[in-house]
Amino acid sequence: MPNPSPSAPVTHARNPLGAHIAVGAGLARGAWTTMRALGADTLQVFAGNPRGWAASAGNPGQDAAFRQRCEDEDVPAFVHAPYLVNLGSPNPTTYERSIAAVAHNLGRTAAIGAQGLVVHTGSCVDDGAYDTGLKQVREGLLPLLDALPDDGPRLLLEPTAGQGRSLCARVDDLEPYLDILEHHPRLGICLDTCHAFAAGEPLDEPDGVATTLERLVKIAGPGRLALVHANDSMDVRGSFKDRHERIGQGHIGTEAFAALLAHPATAGVPFVLETPGGDAATAEDLVLLAGLRDR
């Protein structure tokens, strides 16, 4: 895969390929430079501390420079919400902080010119609290979605691996989740392959990718899939364990990613790695994905 200079325009193939990248020295100085060094043409970042509630104001200069580069070079960027966010939590403090964190991060997503904010779909935590959890999701997210402009970022729902009384893990779980949010036009889907596999989706079977994506499109509608987190799995299908592995080195396998990259439902959809091993491993996995994409 070519390694363009920081100012070179990018011509996307069928799917932009990239990774979750640490901001480091700043969005434009750090994250952007790392993206280009990896040979990537899309990226995902955190807009603050992923494991804390404190809201980061960002750096206006870095925000503006990053936003301009995304626009000039047609780079789709994404922000991931903090891991602590759980709109299904029975703890009132956690719930209120989660709403505030999503609202703040949507603002940061717009400020840096990113296309979407990825938010985990959450857990109701307690037995028998599923309906209450979904009601909280509706009350918390609908006002935020209604406030998003048509040309602003989308809120991307990322189903989890099925652990801890998940509100949404398998593709079929998206149906009640989207229903409660009225299939809002500013909603998108982020499909994490490790999560889906851990929750039980048969991505390792010959037709498993096709059947999974076709169900997703039937439930969510065409154009709703906006991002794929491309992660192999250290654990077997249905393990409910969220442990990412490098592409082709886990239980999902290389052919599943080839099928994902070839399916009509993923046409134009960016793929972002969240795999272990550091920058060198990420660069190798990007080359592998590019080869699968360009078959």
Image (tube, rainbow, N blue to C red):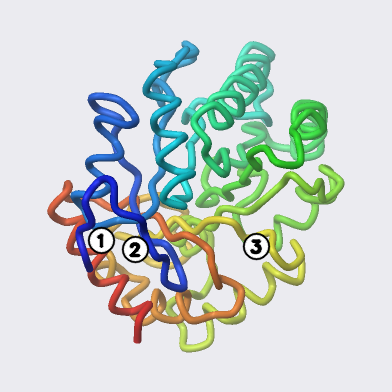
Residue 171's disc is: 3
In the rendered structure, which amino acid carries the disc numbered 3? Val
Mark 2 and mark 1 in contact? Answer it, CB < 8 Å.
yes
- Does 147 appear above or below 33? above
In percent of the image, x 76 and y 26: which residue is there?
140
Dot 3, crowdedness within 10 Å: few (<14), some or many (≥20)? many
Gap between marks 1 and 3 measured at Cα: 23 Å
In the rendered structure, which amino acid carries the disc numbered 2? Asp
Q: Which residue is the site of mark 1?
A: 246
From the top left corner, tell me how far across and down residue 245 is, in percent. 28, 58
Of marks 2 and 1, which one's residue comes earlier in the chain? 2
Gap between marks 3 and 2 measured at Cα: 18 Å
Tag 1 secondary structure: loop
From the top left corner, tell me how far across and down residue 62 is, in percent. 37, 23
The image quarter containing residue 16 is bottom left
Q: Which residue is the site of mark 2?
A: 232
Of marks 3 and 2, which one's residue comes earlier in the chain? 3
